[in-house]
Every structure is written in C-alpha cells, then in structure tokens.
Amino acid sequence: MIEVKGLTKYYGELAAIHDLNFSIGRGEVIGFLGLNGAGKTTALKILGCVLLPTAGEVTVDGIDIARDPHAVRRRIGFLPDTPPLYNEMTVGRYLAFAAELRGVPAAEAPRAVADAEDKTATREVHDQPISSLSHGYRQRVGVAQALVHQPKLLILDEPTSGLDPVQIVEMRATIRALRGEHTILLSSHILSEISQTCDRLLVIQRGEIVAQGSEQQLATQLGGGGTIEVEVAAPAARAIEIARTVTGIGAGTVVREADGIALVSLEGSPDLRPKVARALVQNGIDLLRIDRGAARLESIFLKLTQDKDSPRNLPQ
Amino acid sequence: MNATFLIARRELGAYFRTMTGYVIAAILLLVDGLLFNVLALGGPDKLSAEVLSQFFFTTSGLAIIAGIFLSMRLLAEERQTGTLVLLTSSPVRDSEIVIGKFLSAFVFLALVIAATIYMPLLVMVNGKVSFGHLFAGYLGLLLIGGAGVAIGTFGSALARTQVLSVIISASIALAMTLAWMMGKVTEHPLNDVFVALALHGRHFPPFQAGSIHVRDVVYYLMVIYIALFGAIRVLEARRWR
C-alpha cells in the first residue's frame, strides 16, 4: 500500500526526517512511535500530500505522490494533529462539505456522512454547530472527515491527544473497528495506546527509524525477552538470589521493599513464571504475586530513544 | 471548477454565519451613508450627476477598504486555526482554493455594494439620474472592490495572522493609490507609468462620471488576475515548508 524510500525533509538547514525507508501492506494498522519533535508529524504530512519532500520517493497504492498528488489524495483520509474543523458549521454540513471536496457526488454525500457518523459515533451531534462540541467529539468528527469518502488509507496524527481516559478507550475502539476496511497509519507518543491498536510499530527518533516490528519482536530484540514481576513476603535480596537459580533469569532489581514485603523485577521471559514460582515456594518464601513485567513497552521505548547505538531496523 | 464553487459556497456561508461579515457590511453602509449626507448632499446646490459622482467617489474608497477587511480571513485564518489542511489534503488544486475564496468575498462585497443603491434612489426623488450613469458607476465599484478583495486575498496568503494580512494588503493598496501622486512629481515618461499603475486616480474617475473605457476595465481585471496569481503561487510554495 505504501512504499517509502529514502524520504528526507529539510526545514532550512534542519533535517526533520532523514532517509526514512519502510513499507506498509494493505490492511495493516501501523503505529508511528516517537517523542515530540521526532519527525512523526512531518512524515505523516508528506504521506498526506500536504507537504512536499526534499528528497526520496513515496508511492501510495503504486502512485507516486510527487507525480500525481490528486490521485493519491483521493485515496487517503488525513487527520492532522489539530482536527481541521470549521467552528461555525454544523457537523452534518461540515462532513458533507468534506465528502464533496474529495469527490463524493452531492447526491451520495448524505449517505457517506451517515456512514462516517455511524463509524465514529457522532450521529447524535449531526445538527450541532462544531463550536459547541466537547474535545472528544471534535476529535471524533476529525476522524469522521478523514473517512467520509471511504479512503483506502487513513492517516491519523495523534488521534488520542488531549482526550480523557474514557474518550481514549472509545477512540481506540473506533480505530479498531475501522481495521480491515482501511489501511491505517497512526502516530502517538503514548505507548500503551499504540501497542494495543497496532499490528506493527515504527519507532522514529531524530527523523530516523530506529526500530520496527511488533511489540513482541521489539521486546525480544531489546529486552532479552521481557521481565517478570514478583511480590514476596521476604527480603528482596534473598528472593532474587533464589530466582536467579532458575536458568534464563538474568539480573533482578528491587522495585520497592517495605514492611517485610518486597517487589522485585527480574529479567527473563514471562514463560519462566511457573519455574520461578516453584523455586521460590520450595525455598520457603511466601509468594504473594507473580506477573509479566508491566510497562514493558515504556522500557523498550526509553531504551530505543536513549541509546544512540541501538540496533536499527530489527529483522521482522 | 466544481471544487471552486464548493469552496466559494462554504466561504460565503461562513460570512453569513459569523459576525465579521455583518460588522464590515454595517460599518461600510454607516460610513457611506454619513459621507453621502456630508459630501454629496451637503454644501452648495449641485446637479444630480455631480451628487452621484461624489457618491461613487466615496463608495469606491470604502469598497477597497471593505474588500481588504473581508478577505483578511480567507487564508490567514485557516492557517491560524489549522483548517487549511482540510483543503490542501483534498484532491483540489491550489488555484481552485484561491479562486473559490476570492469569489466568496467578492460576492459578499457585491451584496453590500448593492445595498448602497438606496442613496442614488434618494437622489432620484428630487433629481434626475440616468441609468447609464448608475450602471457605469456600479460596474466601477464592483471592479475596484474586486481589486481590493484580490489584493486582500494575496495579503491573506502571505500572512500568518489576520492583522498582518490587513497590514500587508492595505500597504499594497495604499502604495498603488499613491502612485497617482508619484506621477505628478516625476518626469516624463516615468510619470505616465506611475499614473497608469494608480489604483484610483486615473482609472476610476471615468466610471464615476458615467463612462466605461475598455482600458480601465482591463486595468482592474489585470490587478485581480495578478493578485490572485500571486496568492496561488504563495500557496503552492507553502507546500515546500
């Protein structure tokens, strides 16, 4: 669906993105992950045909964006970081305008609008002026305008930014419901969100892709198989000592220790949990809880964005 | 062409749904009415044609100013609020965006100018007004107002904020108007160039007096064309940064 080769964009002397290479298959849901200023928005704007690249080649559905931007724009729906909403219009009129702008015939526009409203749960605000909408609705109307003309490719720049936890869950469900019908490319700096909605992650830093793959693949490559969290009613040092007798368990760190209860994080595959539990119990340690390490993606992300020498383009 | 119409229709709707359009229309009509009473009707007794000529003179200046203020929001506001992306990410040419927006402001200005018709009608009550004179005057107002809107659209394409947009467009319009005075203090043949470029001094008075010359019509159409061409180019260039 998308082929990107050597994509580079300079703002004056500053390279916002440098030599990006990746490809995205039809129907995939891809997450662009990176800190603010990493180059996500620039890359998405180029894919959305809003900005022209300094160098490199981008094809969408086999069409070069520099040669025939109109044909590409008809195939994509783009939600920029701030939804492009006309405050004085009602939701229905606004969506009809967006649909006709992308070539939906006026007679079919009401149907297209109704479809988009159903998919994004915005039917009940159809007649409301956009200026009166809450932030969550604004964001959803933004998604609705991106998909009102049934594009093959949806590009969503930080679709959950500024939403409250309930709205984030709703937005996630909305995006998940769209999978299959569209190829989706979304960006975020919120890690948990992106790992839950996407098939594959592209981690971008200082304008370059530093890693790509599924959460599991990234974890295996970088975290040596993840971590295990253990809570015991015993001294932490003793618990770590016993756990490390299990083959495959690496270093252990004390997360917290108070009132005789210790929380310990062990490096090792979560598959080793039964063995660790058995070892601890057999050695007379009271096991309160054992779990796969939380915040795994955060640690991967930090590792990737802090290590300059991190491996690039992990095998998929 | 379809996209141009679509954009023009939406923009025109925006003038009617927000305060800006009404405020500018109200100010133009108020000031024009006052000037009509003071300058055109006041003073010693005049012929109807003179009153009408004075009316077209004051209205033409207001039409330029209103055109600049009406068009300040066209592109600058969209860039400020981030809505321009909706248009630039759609399969629409930059020329269609600019022309659509120009048309919306122009049609709104034309409606406001049409609303000034009550003043010539008042002259008719006690005097004699020829329809040819009226037609020529209003054609001139539309052309000079269109030039104001086009210059405003160009300023709006350049500026990041609406205030800056007005400052840029007003400076251009003022410089073009003052070219008339430059023509008076410069030597031949430079003075002819300045006079021919002037936005008002040479090209509007014939309309005001009730005569239509092709060269004046062409002049205003050229101003509109060049300003819009510039605006389109600015918009295209923005895609590079």
Image: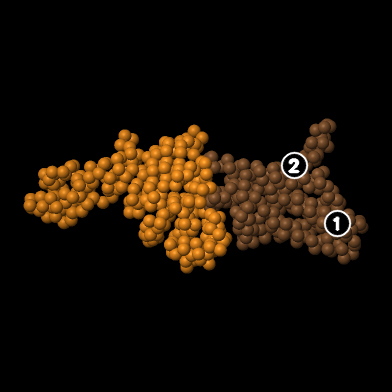
Instruction: Describe residue B18's horizontal placement relative to residue A281 as left or right.
Output: right
Query: Picture quarter containing residue B177?
Result: top right
- SS category of the residue bearing label 2: helix
Up the image or down, A271 lies above or below A106; here it is: above
Q: Which residue is mark 2?
A: B176
- Identify which residue is drawn at 33% across, 37% down: A312
- Identify which residue is drawn at 69% across, 43% down: B226
Q: Which residue lies most toward the front here? A: A62
Q: Which mark is residue B132?
A: 1
- Identify which residue is drawn at 81% across, 46% down: B214
Query: Could you classify mark 1 by the number of other residues whose Cα lies within 10 Å: few (under 14), some (14-19), or many (20 or more)?
Result: few
Three-letter amino acid code of the residue under disc 2: Met
Q: Position of residue B59 (x, y in %)?
A: 78, 54
Looking at the image, how many numbered discs can be counted on the residues? 2
Q: Name the colour assigned to chain B in the rendering.
A: brown
Q: Sequence-wise, which precedes: disc 1 or disc 2?
A: 1
Q: Position of residue A303 (x, y in %)?
A: 30, 41
Three-letter amino acid code of the residue under disc 1: Gly
Q: Is residue A75 visible?
A: yes
Query: Could you classify mark 2 by the number of other residues whose Cα lies within 10 Å: few (under 14), some (14-19), or many (20 or more)?
Result: some
The chain holding disc 2 is B
Mark 1 and mark 2 residues within 8 Å of each other at the beta carbon: no
Residue B26 vs residue A129, the one in the foreground: A129
The chain holding disc 1 is B
Q: Name the colour assigned to chain A in the rendering.
A: orange
Q: Is residue A138 visible?
A: no
Q: CA distance from mark 1 to mark 2?
A: 28 Å
Q: Of tags 1 and 2, which is closer to the observer?
A: 1
Instruction: Describe residue A242's horizontal placement relative to residue A55 as left or right.
Output: left
- SS category of the residue bearing label 1: helix
Asked if both marks, 1 and 2, belong to the same chain, the answer given is yes
Q: Position of residue A134 (x, y in %)?
A: 47, 61
